[in-house]
Image (cartoon, rainbow, N blue to C red):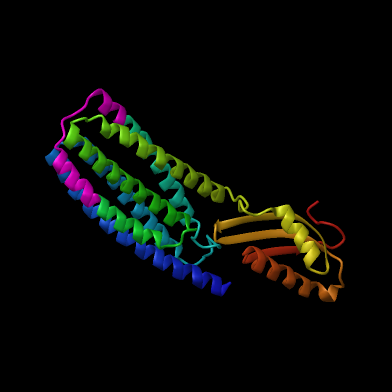
Amino acid sequence: MAHDHGHVHQANRGNLRRVMIALVLTGSFMIVEVIGGIVSGSLALLADAGHMLTDSMALGLAAMAFHVSKRPPDGRLTYGYQRFQILAAFVNGLSLLVIVGWILFEAAHRFLSPNPVLGETMLAVAAAGLLINIASFAVLHTGDKENLNIRGAALHVAGDLLGSVAAIVAALVIIYTGWTPIDPILSVAVAGLILKSAWMLVRRSAHVLLEGAPEWLDVNAMQARIVTVVTGVDEIHHVHIWGLTPQQLMLTMHISLSCDVSQQSDVLRAVKEFLRKEYGIGHATIEVDIDGCADV
């Protein structure tokens, strides 16, 4: 367990560094985009600047989550603060859904009331934004891909990246054809892509917060394997599996043994070793039933 916790903390330090780099890049360019939107008269750029403001807040929340999760367990939170990462991922997912709704609202408004736009200025700012977003996404993409907090931050930046691509395409169309409806049309397309990823993030983080079993794990099959593989285990019941994070799984269960009392400790060690090696469950609490289950 000490090795596992050390690995988690080391990974979180790397993730925190990546999120801070993305936060500086995103927050700095947001100011540039606001100025560019005002100068060009582009509502699309101002809307994307608002998106980047929300992203900066989300990245700040993700960074705070990694910082808080480094705190050791105490008398009030005996498992520590790792779950704060999942809360941050859940909030980030919800904020993405709000952004999607806002983009759709703004797109409808632009269809009804199109505004003149300086395409050249819009193109220059959007192209610079694309480079910044690519750099931020590349930094985050090298982090822990199974960490929901990193995934949430990366999804926010990916939404900005797609927004920059859409703004570039819209600027080119406006420059060469003068057709302004392309701007809201591409905004709706980007919103659709963000919506799918945001919903998956909310669903996965909510599953962890509700202490659901890992989606990849068949609990009944796991019980059957333990009885088959570990000599001395007769029956298993009252199984509960959840995770502080998707990487830190916890388990409690009752087992009935068919071995001598002198062998019980060896059997318990064998079960815990099997759970650790085969399923990555590093924290297992096992109660041995003697003369029937005490909880019945």
Residue nearer the viewer, 34 or 293: 34
| Secondary structure character of the magenta stretch overall | helix
Coordinates of residue 234 in the picture (x, y in percent)? 84, 62
On screen, 249 above or below 53? below
Residue 269 falls left or right of residue 143: right
On screen, 31 above or below 72? above
On screen, 278 above or below 187? below
Residue nearer the viewer, 188 or 21: 188
- Which corner quadrant of the image does residue 122 belong to? top left
Residue 165 belongs to magenta span = no
On screen, 70 above or below 84? below
Report the residue at 49% width, 60% height from top.
Answer: 82
- Which corner quadrant of the image does residue 14 belong to? bottom left
Coordinates of residue 49 in the picture (x, y in percent)? 24, 44
Coordinates of residue 132 in the picture (x, y in percent)? 26, 55
Q: Can residue 46 be seen in this view?
A: no
Report the residue at 17% width, 36% height from top.
Answer: 176
Residue 108 belongs to magenta span = yes
Report the residue at 74% width, 71% height from top.
Answer: 270
The residue segment tinted magenta is 106-129
Residue 151 falls left or right of residue 108: right
Task: Spot the residue most to the left.
Answer: 39
Residue nearer the viewer, 155 or 266: 155
Coordinates of residue 151 in the picture (x, y in percent)? 44, 54
How many badges with numbers are in the image?
Answer: 0
Q: Can residue 212 be seen in this view?
A: yes
Residue 78 falls left or right of residue 121: right
Report the residue at 30% width, 61% height from top.
Answer: 21
Residue 240 falls left or right of residue 205: right
Residue nearer the viewer, 29 or 296: 29
